[in-house]
Amino acid sequence: MLETRDLTKVYNESVLAVNELNLKVDDGEIYVVLGANGAGKSTTISMLLNFIEPTSGTALVDDIEIPKFPLEAKKHLAYVSENVELYRNFTARQNLSFFAKLGGRKKVSNEELDATLGRVGLPEEAFTRRVKTFSKGMRQRLGIAIAIMKNAQAVLLDEPTSGLDPKGGADFLNLLRELKEEGKAIFMSTHDIFRAKEIADRIGILVQGNLERELTRDEILDEDLEALYLHYVAGYEPEEDATE
Amino acid sequence: MIWHIIKRELFDHINSLRFILTFLILSALMVTNAVVHLQTHQDRVRDYSEDVTNTSNELKSRTQLYSLAEKGPGRLYKRPSSLSFIADGGEAYLPRRTYNEGSWSKSGIGGRVKSNWWLSYGSVNPDAKDFRPQATKIDWVFIITYLLSFIPLLFTFDALSGEREQGTLRLCLANPISRPTLLIGKFLGTLITVLIPFIFAVLLNLAVISTDSWTQLSGADWGRLGLILLIATSYAGIFIGLGLMVSAGTREPRVSLVILLLIWVATVVFMPSTLGILSTKWMTPVQTDDQFDASKDAALRQISTDFDDRMQTIKEKKSPNLLSMSELEKLFETSPEEAMAAARKMQEAWETEGDEEMALKAEYINKDVEIRERFNRQHLDAQIAQVQRARDITRFSPAAIVQYALESMAGTGFNRHLQFLEHVHRYIKQFREFIVETDRADIQSRHLIGIPKGMSEKPIASEAIPEFEDKVTFSDTFNTATLDLLLLVLLLGVFLSGAFIVFLRAEV
């Protein structure tokens, strides 16, 4: 379970990036946060990973306070970034093995590595290929393999579908569904409202650091998410019916 | 955990082109150094042995105590270091021996007075016949100073900025690993990467050198070699720390590369060669040779006049009716025969040497030696002080510090020369004490050191004469290198701490 309590970040004592953010992602739930560039999505993820200290408030993973016990908390967190570059001179297997060990795994067998790489849809010939020859979609799959391998309870994804082709995007969402099935708490930031609508159990709309609206699965299905997003993010109002 | 990071760094570096180039360049330079050493060291050692043997034979040939006091111990030679391949130390610009001087004599009212020897240090560069710039000496100092500073920067400029740019830094730190652990892992990984080709090149160098029978390394030499490797490691560590610090503070690898190259040129290339020269502008100039000679001659004239006056008084007291020179000249014009008789009487009186005259002569001769040596020493000390100040100022550069430390440990260069001079001074004291003690043991001697009739005439056993030994122990070299070793450790601490502070504050 992932939770933020009045999580706030102010840069240089004047720029409010995230303002008293309160949200909760339960196990087996996918929470998608939508927002324009600069809305505070990445800052929130950075605070959840303790890359930056919150100005006030706190965040918890499995009831462990992240700012106070960052190393312990990170054992429960996996992260997939927007552009998973990885170590270009390493093969997929070597990258996966390295990050698994960094995540705390003592021994990892090649069979386990290959099984994980296969699960995310990487072709077998790519296991021993250097990552610098990979396409973005393949690197993204490898990124999710790293998150799977860590077997953390919460998974943070920072704009993971940007730049993926439709098939790559669809495959990626399937992988997320699998993780959800396994009971992971998944927190994903994106501005891809269509994929958000497809996968999210709940959606939060972040505007200038404030969580302006939170939608449940039913609301997501009922409402015109695109119009809602444009309303909050860009200030567009839906056109009124001329006959009225 | 840290081991995984070290392993990853190693793997990444070892598979890079820069590692292969490092390997090739270091190996080539070290082999070149060894080959050049084999060609030159033999001559150096042979020349030294011959010179020392000649001096020793000459010394042993003196069987009279006075001849020892008059001629001294001969030229004293600096022993060439068996580790000179590590640090050339600019030995070509430093005297390789001291001189015995003592060649004046004067005749006058007290009869003939002949000088005793005195110690002279020679000019700064008595052996160099050609002052044209030499080709760069490819010794370990050159290799370590330039390459073990440049190579670490090549391996670290993108260590953090590159990882930040490609996103792997965030991915790493999303795991239960602290920033200090990551930084230490990167530091150690890079250090091992740099040391692998360096140690290989060192072994290659030593393997070639071990074929030379003229280079025999003692246990102490191996100890010094071990410390030299530690110094090289610390020096490389300083630049790894610097590279990580700049890399942690910049967002793009090319920016950190440019910054690091500028720092490298300033600290390794520019500062050591230029700071020393610039610093002399603010120093009180050392006396020129002419000024030095003039002040020394004035002091010597003073004791000479004093000697003449006192001798005149003694002679007048002993022979009160002697004519002065002007009176003798006048008498010669009027009565040459009487003048000749008076002159004979004068000469007789002058040449009559009693205890009082001998004591005065001995005092004069010893004072002459004392003044000459005092002035020589003062001049030398002023030169040394100036060099020391210039060296202190260049210590702003880690390259200068490592050069001084390596020279000290290898037993070459300026500090080694100071040790040689210290050994010379200690020996000279021992040599003079030997003369005094030997003379004192003879009850028939007048104990007036410095004049033939005033000293023991008993023959001396050649094996009893102390011989000069310019031996450098491990502790001698270590002690002279202590300051530079401490400075290196301090710099290592400063740059590593800097890297930590910048990385802890940096965005990932």
Image (spheres, coloured by chain):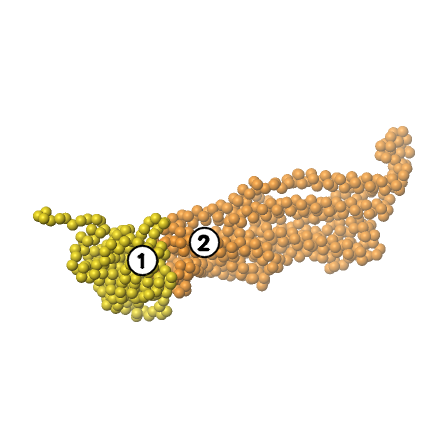
Amino acid type of disc 1? Asp
Residue B479 visible somewhere in the drawing: yes
Q: Position of residue B122 (x, y in %)?
A: 65, 46
Q: Quadrant of the N terminus of chain B?
A: bottom left
* Label 2: which secondary element: helix
Q: Position of residue B396 (x, y in %)?
A: 52, 48
The vertical placement of B250 against B213, above or below, is above
Tell me: B353 left or right of B236: right
Which residue position holds label 1? Answer: A6
Judge by depth and name the residue closer to the eye, B284 or B415.
B284
Q: What tint does the image give chain A?
A: yellow
Q: Quadrant of residue B325?
A: top right
Q: Position of residue B507 (x, y in %)?
A: 36, 54
Q: Badge 1: few (under 14), some or many (20 or more) residues near its Cα, within 10 Å?
A: some
Residue under the image location 64 percent in, 40 percent down:
B287
Q: Are marks 2 and 1 on the same chain?
A: no
Label tally? 2
Q: Quadrant of residue A123?
A: bottom left
* Label 1: which secondary element: strand
The vertical placement of B310 against B12, above or below, is above
Residue under the image location 56 percent in, 54 percent down:
B483
Residue under the image location 86 percent in, 44 percent down:
B352
Which residue position holds label 2? Answer: B498
Q: Which is in the foreground here, disc 2 or disc 1?
A: 1
Judge by depth and name the residue closer to the eye, B183 or A63.
A63
State which chain disc 1 sits on: A
Q: Quadrant of the C terminus of chain B?
A: bottom left
Residue B41 visible somewhere in the drawing: no
Amino acid type of disc 2? Gly
Judge by depth and name the residue closer to the eye, A202 or B184.
A202
> Chain in orange?
B
User: In whole angstroms, how far apart are the C-alphas of marks 2 and 1?
Assistant: 34 Å
